[in-house]
Amino acid sequence: MNRYIRLSAALALLMLALIPTFAVSAQDGIETVCLVTDIGRVNDGTFNQYAYEGMMRAVEDFDLDSTFIETQSQTDYQTNIETCLQEGYEVIITVGFLIADATAEAAAANPDVYFIGVDQVNEDPENLPNYVGIQFREDQAGFLVGAMAALMTETNVIAGVYGIDVPAVVKFRHGFEQGARYINPDIEVLGVYIASFTAPDLGAAAAEQFLGEGADVIFGAGGSTGSGGTLYAAQNGAYVIGVDQDEYFTTFGGGETPGAENLITSAVKRVDNGVYNMIELLVNGEPLPEDGIYMLEAANDGIGFAPAHDADVPEEVTERIQEIYEALKDGSLDTGVDPLTGALLEEAEATEEATVEADEE
Amino acid sequence: MQTTSPPLGPSAPALPTQSWRDRLKITRSGVFSILFVLFGLWALIAAPQSYSPETVTGLTFGSGLPRVEVPTLSFVTVAGWLFLLGGLVGLAASFISGGSPVVVDERKPQATVLDRVARFWLIVNGILIIPTILIIAAANNSTNVTVMLQVSVRLATPIALGALAGIWCERSGVVNIAIEGMMLTGACFGFVALTIFAEMMPTATAIWLGVLVAVLSGGAMALLHAWLSITFRTDQIVSGTVINILAVGITSFLRREVLFSSEAGRETLQAIRIPVLADIPVLGDVLFNGRPIFYAMFILLVVTHVVLFYTRWGLRTRAVGENPHAADTLGINVIRNRWINVLIGGLIAGLAGAWFSLETTGNFEDNMTSGRGFIGLAAMIFGKWTPFGSFAGALLFGFSDALGQRFQFLGVPVPPQFLQMVPYIITIIVLAGLVGRAVAPKADGVPYEKEGKS
């Protein structure tokens, strides 16, 4: 209820503000943005919040008009986008993989409105030049924290608790494993996919099994299944690594939650930067990327690793990770993971080498 | 068990003469015998090709205990012969004397020596198959047996509690498929209560109030179930479904409205080491170093068993579940009995919910019980509506959850999607193959209507 009141109040105010704006609007740059969340709210500590923060930063910097709609169920995606359209917004930001279809449809029906989709792919960039999907190099973020795990472990056994094996999770996993092996080729890296993003108890069980095998750094990448694993491991004395955002402020309650002193870093996706950069592009009247994808990677500060906060991470470790980050940034280091599917590229190369050797013989 | 009553009737059924068709009839143990034969053949033929005689499987048992190295090939060969011969003996037994050597059936009242041997051997093989698979999976590697058992029993806790909740309801004749929903409600309300009380008092106290609220909210859902299905005689399946859907709605609404602003993980109930007992190697870690709800599960197990089979209330409950009209004639208040039993079931289901949010994860997530309430019902059926039998079923499911994960990180060359199915495949095999005919209480699912009324 509250939401509707807030929204209608916001819309009423905006309409008053917008009527004159439209009358004089003749420049290229956009002036109004509307955000539709995935199921959740703009302060829920997930992508929704980071997309919202990115938008609000742009709104302040470029003096735009904005509003947001919080989606309550999957059946509302279309309706909410429709609401934004009817109110005449020039840019519509939709958050999440699940809202992609509704976004693509709306983009096709409204060629003069721009669409920015977080965690989405524009499958048809030629016909939909007004739609951009924001993607991430999870493998690079995973690579950084994997290297960190390899530097911090004493038992030489590290492990990951993963959710459903969707591309983003597979990229995190392979990046993590590649990064660990980059530091120490002989390290033992365990990992398990769990068929749910909402089963923290199974995540905790996996973490318990890993600790039993001697693992002393646990990476949790799979929604609350993953954070179930990191919470358990952190409270039982292992170092842990968060995912997506700096989990120090979410899962570990800003240091209030027991075990926060064992969170050494998080593999961060800068959703806010992605949204901000795309809005900036449109404000300046520039076209969206031609291939319909805006890849957030080390090179544009789209991914990164979170600071250690309360954990005791030696300075030389942080420096080493920063070096690797720079190397990923300038392209001198590659993760060996396919940036879209998450498959390991190494295997392909290995077979190529094998054929070359066979030829030489 | 005390509960399997002989079939009611004037006299025991006459023995049918055994025809060839009877002898060739596929029995449950016949199928398992064939499976064991195939598995034995596979172990004897395929294993020597995959493992060299030097391959060992390391078994560790936790800190302070020595590592045991099992020569993989020898173990698998010995096990393979056991499976093969046991399977053949089982087949022979079910063929020679007809009928099944394991399940006592009316066609075969007297077990021969061959039957006894076959039955014993099949049970040995059924147990042996688990370490065999584990040793094959962990070849060239090592695996921590203690932790795996520990995780198994821990994951079995909510399943066992769910099964107990089911037993209380169904023994009195009320089908309860709403256990899942009651668990979810308990998990959510308990955690919400913790976040609220934690602002007024130390977390260690607030968490116990949270457990109390979880138990009570499970009970509240049960009262709704009782109201709909006992008082209003709604179809019990429909009422249960309504509660499951309602629980998903209420809890996800509460999570959005109350928990979003404080979605950080919380403290959980702390483990209690039972002195002396916890120092027993392996067993001590598995059973005597648990957390409160884990222990409560064992206590409730014994209490349920005693109440159900050794008290007047239990006798009345079973009577109401089997034949409410007869019970009514004898002066038992059927409606009241059912209300109370359904309520007790709900309280236990609420406690199972607290296991998720307050004991294990320190967090609440939409639909975090992910079907464990339904698996609890499967465990209940596995145990034929008896507490200890259900606990065995719960252990099996907890173990298969733990095993599915372990297979993945031991590098079993099977895609993870298939390994994630392990618990469910085991459920199907167990329910279809091992349980035998599970007989529910006779009046289970039938709303009670007093004769002459309405």
Image (cartoon, rainbow, N blue to C red):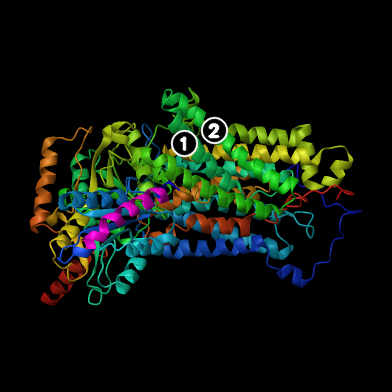
Q: Is residue B168 above or below residue B52?
A: above
Q: Mark 1 Cα within 10 Å, few/some/many (few <14, many 20+)?
A: many
Q: Secondary structure at mark 1?
A: helix
List the residue tagged with mark 1: B192
Question: Looking at the picture, which amino acid does disc 2 mark?
Answer: Val
Q: Is residue A12 magenta?
A: yes
Exactly how many numbered labels are in the figure? Answer: 2
Pick the front one: A194 or B122: A194
Question: Looking at the picture, which amino acid does disc 1 mark?
Answer: Val
Which of the 4 image quadrants contains residue A88?
bottom left
Residue at 18% x, 63% y is A24
Q: Is residue A163 magenta?
A: no
Main secondary structure found in the magenta portion? helix
Q: Earlier in the sequence, mark 1 or mark 2?
A: 1
Which chain is indicated by disc 1?
A: B
Rendered location of residue A272, percent (x, y): 22, 51
List the residue tagged with mark 2: B213
